[in-house]
Amino acid sequence: MKISVITAVFNAENSIAKCVDSVASQQNADFEHILVDNCSTDQTVKLALEHNPRLKVISEPDQGIYDAMNKGARHAAGDILAWLNADDFYFPGTLSEAVRIFTEHPEVQIVHGNLRVNGREVRPPSGPASFGGARIFHPAAFLRRELFERVGPFDPTYKLCADLDFFLKGKKAGAVFYHADQIFTDFALGGASTKHRILTAEEVRRALLENGCGWGRANLFYACMRLRGFAVKWFVRPVHGVQG
């Protein structure tokens, strides 16, 4: 069972080395790492290849983050697909744990874990904010290629929330999710979705409506997300401090 880790990147010379190292140092797993570069003008690609000469690099213009993520999937050779942001990094043993779960649970199509955010462990939300269990963290998620080909690709008309749209589609299609209650990924705040709160709220509402969650529920979440701090309070659930 091979995992393809896909990283879409543009001008990330300050973080790409740690991201690449975190994948290259994974043990007891068969994997490849694909860098989809939107023609970076800094040293991103050079540094990435210095840290992993076996890295597969696709360097050409793209039409946004989800176009790049789809492009990486088209070039992937793995049975399992994962997307790791250029500012994020995996914890040791993450890939082998994902493989173990998929091997022991052939009915599972999506394996996902927890994040570390600003030194704190964060679990996916539960209850109404989980959207039926589909509200998971894509930098800590792994999915079978078969599911991506059946339900995907990511819808590039979304700017920020095509991953939520995909997981909602997967849930609607009967995909089995497995939550591994351990940290898979260190997540860096400051990405587009954390900067553009209103657009994120609008796209969450759209994803909920397009996947049959109903006007009442979609508009309730939209209104709540427009309130400052809602995303932190409801969409991530801190557990405890984590060193490392």
Image (cartoon, rainbow, N blue to C red):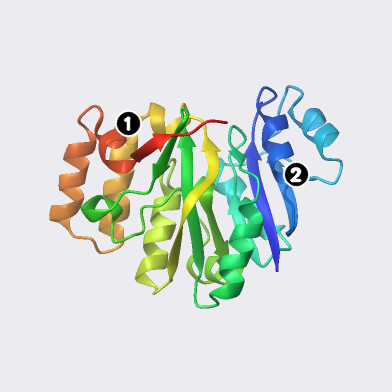
Left or right? Give the position of 135 relative to 114. Answer: left
Q: In this figure, which residue is indicated by the disc labeled 1?
A: 197
Q: Residue at x 33, y 35 (%)?
A: 199
Left or right? Give the position of 217 relative to 47. Answer: left
User: Which quadrant holds the N terminus?
Assistant: bottom right
Answer with the quarter of the image where residue 14 lies.
Answer: top right
Residue 26 lies, in percent from the top left, at 72, 49
Q: Residue at x 25, y 50 (%)?
A: 129
Residue 123 lies, in percent from the top left, at 39, 46
Mark 1 vs 2, N-terminal side: 2
User: Which quadrant holds the C terminus?
Assistant: top right
In the rendered image, the vertical position of residue 14 relative to residue 87, given as above or below = above
Left or right? Give the position of 195 relative to 20. Answer: left
Mark closer to the observer (1, 2): 2
Calculate the distance from the C-alpha at mark 1 to the C-alpha at mark 2: 35 Å
Residue 187 lies, in percent from the top left, at 51, 36
Tag 2: residue type?
Answer: Ser
In the rendered image, the vertical position of residue 139 relative to residue 30, given as above or below = above
Q: Secondary structure at mark 2?
A: loop
Can residue 155 be seen here? The reply is no
Pick the front one: 123 or 58: 123
Can residue 173 be seen here? The reply is yes
Residue closest to the far bottom? 107
Q: Residue at x 52, y 49 (%)?
A: 140
Q: In this figure, which residue is indicated by the disc labeled 2?
A: 25
Residue 43 lies, in percent from the top left, at 77, 23
Tag 1: residue type?
Answer: Arg
Pick the front one: 14 or 23: 23
Q: Residue at x 61, y 51 (%)?
A: 94
